[in-house]
Image (tube, rainbow, N blue to C red):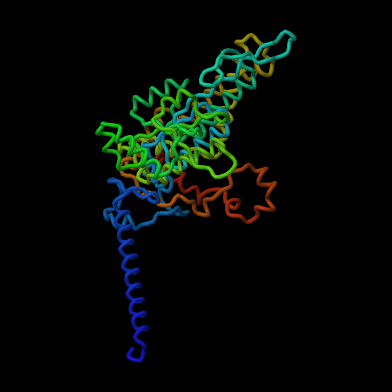
Amino acid sequence: MSSIPLPTKHFLLGFATALSAVWVSQRLMALSASSSTRNTKSSRSPTKDATSTSNNDKEQDDHVVMDTPDLDQRMIRKAEAVIQWRTARITVVVERCTNDFNYSAILRTAEALGVQHVWIIDPPLPPTLAEDTNGDIMEVPTKENAGRPVPTGQFTPQELKGRAMHHIFARGAGEWLTVREFQNTTDCIQALKETNHTLWVTDLSQQAVCLTRDVLLQQQQSNNNDSHDPQQSSSSSSILPPKLAIVFGTEAVGCSEELLQAADLRVYLPLRGFADSLNLSVATALVLHQLFVLDPTIVGDMPPQEQQELRQTWFTKLCQQRLMTPKQKKTRGRLQLAIQQCDKIQAKEERGELVQPGERKKLNQKQQFLQELADLERTCRLDDQGTRDLQTAIADLVQHPPAPLTDMRRADNHRVCFVGKNTKKKHQEHWKDMVATSNADTKAQHSASFFRERVFG
């Protein structure tokens, strides 16, 4: 380097020193991030439980378990992953959702993001219908309660059907959730107080605070300065409360005044367009996702006892669902539908309405349908005794579950298109050779065979 001018030497030495400093800084940041990851729960992989089958914690952390066609205990591994990712720290409260599609979407979103508890405040029933002086149908004015009509009377068949569908959607979408229903807002607020929930209510008014880290930390600091509660101060290390209930109101006007007055905090998501509100299910999805971004430690934050209860319930359910053959499932659905039709005919008769001969013939077969259904469920271990037998057959899995999946994406062999045959046929030209339309089932009924061998031998 003797032939290099002195200024150039100084520049090269300085440049080399800067590069070294950058490299050292990056290494320190990487080591710090690695240490932080080991000391906190990751949102990308399930927390490791004492019941895990591996004896080497480091191997567990580095081991990736993904869905494959030949993966043993596939559904149990998937369920275990979901359980270890589930959180009990957040409770979603939905007040008077009046749209069935929003209702189902909210439940599906909560389940997909890992929220276990959803509380539902039933929407108000439609206003009373009556005839006016001209004999035309009109809506009877109703009392107002927090800006919502209070049900006071009779309903049309269409309204009753819509009301029934509301609960059908809830049962289907909430199969893996703990759903609690309330008839009114007052009862829900009282239950939240009894369970020590902090109540955050979504609101578009200017009294609401922005659901961002800086604003929430500022609000938290302000609350701690005004409070002498040591428990509240001790929880300040987390940006979210120990038990948070986040409330979403009805599509038209949001949360009721009763809930707004009861709220510990009113919150909103910042919007940057002309639209000043979002679809209810979309808003729910964005707010829940934001909560997980604000505090990743809520992932998997569930008491061990509750996790164990979910294992018992879910593993049993997974086993029951796979003991029936496709033909048995079809027969069971047919019998259940026939029994429902008989119940409708029977209710019609009890109201004093005329029952047609064909309806009478079907009603006379009700006991036969009930007996066939009972025999089928007994054969498939779906009755009470069968459930106890299943719990015994999978007891070891509940106590010592296998290593969970670390990635919930399905293998291509397991990706299916959740639409009917007619829809597939309609789009067959555009969907040709796509992965989701090329598969119909898992390899050789792998999961079903696993459970059947355990139960039937």
Q: Position of residue 365 (x, y in %)?
A: 60, 20
x then y, percent, for residue 20: 32, 72
Image point 34% across, 81% down: which residue?
A: 10
Residue 258's place in the image compared with 133, above or below, is: below
Dividing the picture into quarters, in which one does residue 132 lie? top right
- Locate residue 216: give its quadrant: top left
In the picture shown, does residue 108 fall above or below 335?
below
Q: Is residue 286 left or right of residue 79?
A: right
Q: Which residue appears at 61% of the width and 16% of the height?
A: 155
Residue found at the very far left of the displayed protein: 230
Where residue 186 appears, as percent x and y from the top left, is 43, 20
The image shows residue 64 at horizontal and vertical percentages of 39, 56
Report the residue that reaches farthest toward the front.
7
Is 184 placed above or below 54 here?
above
Total of numbered circles in the picture? 0
State left or right for residue 379 relative to residue 1.
Answer: right
Front-most of residues 438 and 379: 438
Task: Locate the N terminus and report the quarter of the image it occupies.
Answer: bottom left
Quarter placement of the C terminus = top left
Q: Nearer the viewer, residue 114 or 315?
A: 114
Of 306 and 188, nearer the camera is 188
**Residue 453 visible in image:** no
Answer above or below: position of 55 versus 348. Answer: below
Q: Is residue 227 visible?
A: yes
Q: Residue furthest bottom?
A: 3
Closer-to-camera residue (66/16): 16
